[in-house]
Image (spheres, helix red, strand yellow):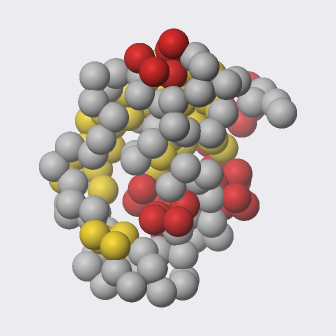
Amino acid sequence: MSFYVAPSQQRTLRACMVCSLVQLHSKFMREGCPNCDNVLGLRGNNDAIQECTSQVFEGLVTLRDPTTSWVARWQRLDSYVPGTYAVKVTGSVSIHPDYSGGGGGGGCLLDTRTIDQDQDQRCLVGITLLLND
C-alpha cells in the first residue's frame, strides 16, 4: 500500500470534509472515500467531490495502523482506514436539498456553512447531516 504522490500531482490533492482523508481527485472519483462514501456518494460523482472535499487543508498525518497509533487516537482517526489525513480542513459545503449522492437512493443533505476541522474537533461544525432513503 503506497501513499506516495508525485510532486506534479500534488495540486490535485483534496481532503474529505467529513473524515479529513487526503487523496488525489482522481482517486476520489475512482474509489470514493473509504470512510464515508456510503454517506457522501463521491465515487464517480465529480459534483459531490467538488462539494464535499476541499483543496484547503493544513498538516498531514499518515497512518499505517490507526487502531494502535497514539497519533490516530489523539487526532480521533482511530476508527478510520489507513491513509493520509489532514490535521485541519477548511471549506464551504453547499449542496442543494434535492441532492442525492451516489446515484442510488441514499445521499446526504448538508446546510451551507463553513467547515473548520482541527485536531480538537473531528466533526462537522454547524453541519446537519441527514440521510435520506
Q: Residue at x 50, y 55 (%)?
A: 36
User: Which x, y percent locates residue 117?
Assistant: 31, 33
Q: Report the side of 11 relative to 5 (left or right).
A: left
Identify whether 24 is placed above or below 102.
Answer: above
Residue 33 makes an appearance in the image: yes
Depth check, front residue: 5 or 64: 64
Image quadrant containing the C terminus: bottom left
Residue, x 53% and y 65% (percent of image)? 38
State the residue at coordinates (40%, 46%): 17
Residue positioned most to the top: 70
- Relative height, residue 36 to residue 101 (above, below): above
> Residue 118, located in which quarter of the rendered image?
top left
**In front of the other: 62 or 65:** 65
* Residue 15 screen position, x and y as percent: 50, 40
Placement of the N terminus among the 4 image quadrants: top right
Using residue 40 as the reference point, say whether residue 80 is left or right of it: right
The percent position of residue 43, horizontal first and vertical second, equals 63, 66
- The residue sitting at 62% across, 58% down in the picture is 32
Q: Looking at the picture, does residue 123 appear above or below residue 3?
A: below
| Residue 131: image location, x then y, percent | 34, 73
Compared with 106, 49 (above or below) is: above
Q: Residue furthest front?
A: 68
Tally of numbered tags? 0
Q: Is residue 46 left or right of residue 114?
A: right
Displayed quadrant of residue 23: top right
* Residue 58 visible at all: no
State the residue lying farthest toward the right.
1
